[in-house]
Image: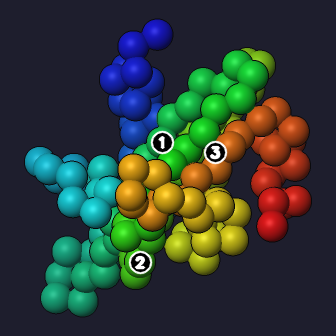
Amino acid sequence: MDTKRLEKIGESFVISSLLDENILVAKPFFDRLGTDLIGFTSIDDKAKFCRIQSKYRDLKISTFVQIDSEYVVGAFVLFLYIKADGKKYFYCLLPKDIKRILKQKTSKAKKVYRLSITRKGLQDGFRDVP
């Protein structure tokens, strides 16, 4: 399956979930610090926003998610949309969750957070990950 199509499916699910919670969503024309979407609580002078990264994975046996460590600061949210065995799993991770669940590694001389995803990890909700 086309990965662009999968990315759009996951991103669309994130957008509809946020809109359902009365969070306004904008799509930037470029990607800075891992920003696929921007979420707003309002548009007035008291607006608060966060950078959102959306990841979609179709899990056959195992897969992984990797994000640059520099993204995981301040108002950042990582949404994981994973399809496995005909079921859909949806996770929302804040920076503290990312730092607790994903493992920090070095990839191509960059620090990254990486999560290997298996069926057991999905069933456990990643609770057993240190």
Q: Nearer the viewer, residue 69 or 7?
A: 69
Could you say which quadrant of the image residue 16 lies in? top left
**Is there CB contact under 8 Å for labels 2 and 1?**
no
Is disc 1 surrounded by few (<14), some (14 to 19) or many (20+) residues within 10 Å?
many
13 shown above or below 70? above
Which of pointers 2 and 1 lies earlier in the amino acid sequence? 1
Disc sitting over residue 90 in the figure: 3
The residue positioned farthest toward the left in the image shown: 29
Regarding mark 3 in the picture, which secondary structure is present there? strand
Regarding mark 2 in the picture, which secondary structure is present there? loop
Display colour scheme: rainbow
Residue drawn at the location 45% of the way across and 64% of the way down: 111
Which of pointers 3 and 1 lies earlier in the amino acid sequence? 1
90 shown above or below 85? below
The residue under label 2 is 73
Residue 52 is at least partly visible in this image: no
Q: Where does residue 57 sit, x and y in percent of width and height?
A: 56, 31
62 shown above or below 107? above
**Is there CB contact under 8 Å for labels 3 and 2?**
no
The residue under label 1 is 55
Query: Tag 2: residue type?
Result: Val
Q: Nearer the viewer, residue 114 or 17?
A: 114
Is disc 3 surrounded by few (<14), some (14 to 19) or many (20+) residues within 10 Å?
some
The residue positioned farthest toward the front in the image shown: 109
